[in-house]
Amino acid sequence: MSQYKYLLTEEDIPKTWYNINPDMPVSPGPVLHPVTKEPVTPDFLTALFPGRFVQEAVSMERWIEIPEPVREIYKLWRPTPLMRARRLELALDTPAHIYYKYEGTSPVGSHKANTAVAQAFYAKEEGTVGFTTETGAGQWGSALAMAGNFFDLEVHVYMVRVSYDMKPHRRVVMRSYGATVAPSPSDKTEYGRKLLAENPDSPGSLGIAISEAVEAAIASEGKYKYSLGSVLGPVLTHQSVIGQEALKQMEMAGEYPDVVIGCVGGGSNFAGFAFPFVHQNLTNGKNARILAVEPAACPTLTKGLYTFDYGDTAQMAPIVKMHTLGHTFMPPGIHAGGLRYHGMAPHICALYEHGDIEAVSVHQLGTFEAALQFAQAEGIIPAPESAHAIRVAIDEALQAREEGRQKVIAFNLSGHGHFDLSSYQAYLQDDLSDYAYPEDMVKEAMTHLPEVNL
Ligand SMILES: *Cc1c(COP(=O)(O)O)cnc(C)c1O
């Protein structure tokens, strides 16, 4: 009998998150204050984030208990399935075995709900009224809107202006959960008003939207906390439920991956899926290749400088050590909005520099070609972000065919593409550009990096 789905029970939902801090072979570097450029005090961070979130950032506990109310909500969609992509294997005529972990089964259609629920619980626990946050394509805003609603918190979302205009249905999702949504740059913050005065038609960017959400949280003097859906250590930790479940499910399948693949924007779905496998590499004698996939138009790991940079455009968010294309860099308008970020999670950058993980960049057209090949074989229309992982999984499978070699490939399907149909429409109408690496823009942005003396 050929099995397609590897399913766990609610009992199998992890009881702890995996925190990679104690296993890091190299330090991800300090977090610096955006003005003093000195290592931040806990006070600065707790003004922005819930206290338990800040504690997790510095925690050296390898296994962090998942609070019971969070685990209860996880039961709405977790455990997620691990699928053997048998029909894709057939279509590719490859000897490789391809597995994917499907995070699109969450109510909001992506992995982002895994950390949104945890952050909302922490905020509620300490009596916060609500959250300010940014969103690009709308996935993060939707996830936090849902989680905030579960815990009776207000959620105020700054949505990158181009996406606000192009993805009206995501706005409806956020509003349905009770959140407010403003196009960024907005007239609600000082920074937004300044940008609108300079350019009323500014398309916005993730870096700008983060600046607005941070400003609004700080101005509220504790009423609102700021929430970030990626990049930071605790977010990566919360996402580790993905990889922990996948490890169990691979065991059910009686195989272990030779290569583990995920797409990277800020790095959270990749880390969530891959870090439990990195843990096996580092401590249990395993030797899987760990592969991060990024867009050629925003190739943070493969082309960015490994240095200190701001997390946002207005220089209000902390400075961290990461691969960056420069905080003033405005990535081209690729359809994978969730991958348009100038920086990358410091933990991923440190592991990349140290040689524990690899990275590759792919072009937009190739990702949509892979997405349709996947949809036609497996039935699921993937998010354009996830399609980056699919592209490389298919390339690995084709290489296995060429070499006549058995290989086990596992990738994270971070979300479905049901809110991205206008992107698919553009592709089907032959109306999609294949953005090259915007070298000149990056060069210019590199002249604005902060000077840090440590
Ligand atoms: C947001 C998003 C991403 C990119 O963010 P990461 O933090 O790098 O995971 C990838 N896939 C989907 C479906 C997303 O919503």
Image (spheres, rainbow, N blue to C red):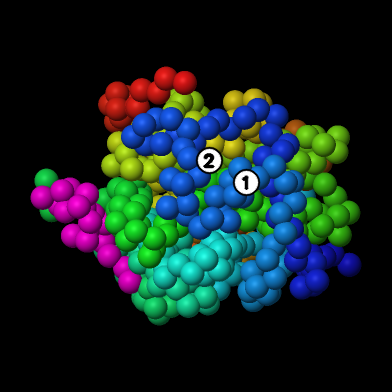
Circle 1 SS class? helix
Q: Is mark 1 within 8 Å of ligand 1?
A: yes
How many numbered badges does the structure rendering display? 2
The span shown in magenta is 180-197
Residue found at x 56% / y 64%: 122
Residue 218 is marked as: none
The image quarter containing residue 433 is: top left
Residue type, label 2: Ala
Circle 2 SS class? loop
In depth, the one of 93 and 312 nearer the eye is 312
- Residue count near mark 2 (Cα–Cα under 10 Å), binned few <14, some 14–19, many ≥20: many
Q: Is residue 211 visible?
A: yes
Mark 2 / mark 1, whichever is N-terminal: 1
Residue 396 on image: x %, y %: 67, 40
Check disc 1 and report the residue beneath it: 271
> Which quarter of the image is occupied by the N terminus?
bottom right
Q: Are marks 2 and 1 in contact (CB under 8 Å)?
A: yes
Check disc 2 and report the residue beneath it: 345
In depth, the one of 231 and 121 nearer the eye is 121
Between the residue at mark 2 and the residue at mark 1, the CA separation in whole angstroms equals: 9 Å
Residue found at x 80% / y 71%: 11
Above or below, 258 relative to 227: above
Residue found at x 36% / y 23%: 451
In depth, the one of 211 and 358 nearer the eye is 211
Residue 345 on the magenta segment:
no
Residue 181 on the magenta segment:
yes
Residue 190 on image: x %, y %: 20, 52
| In this rendering, position of residue 428 left or right of residue 245 | left
Residue type, label 1: Ala
Residue found at x 52% / y 66%: 126
Q: Is mark 2 within 8 Å of ligand 1?
A: yes
In depth, the one of 390 and 179 nearer the eye is 179
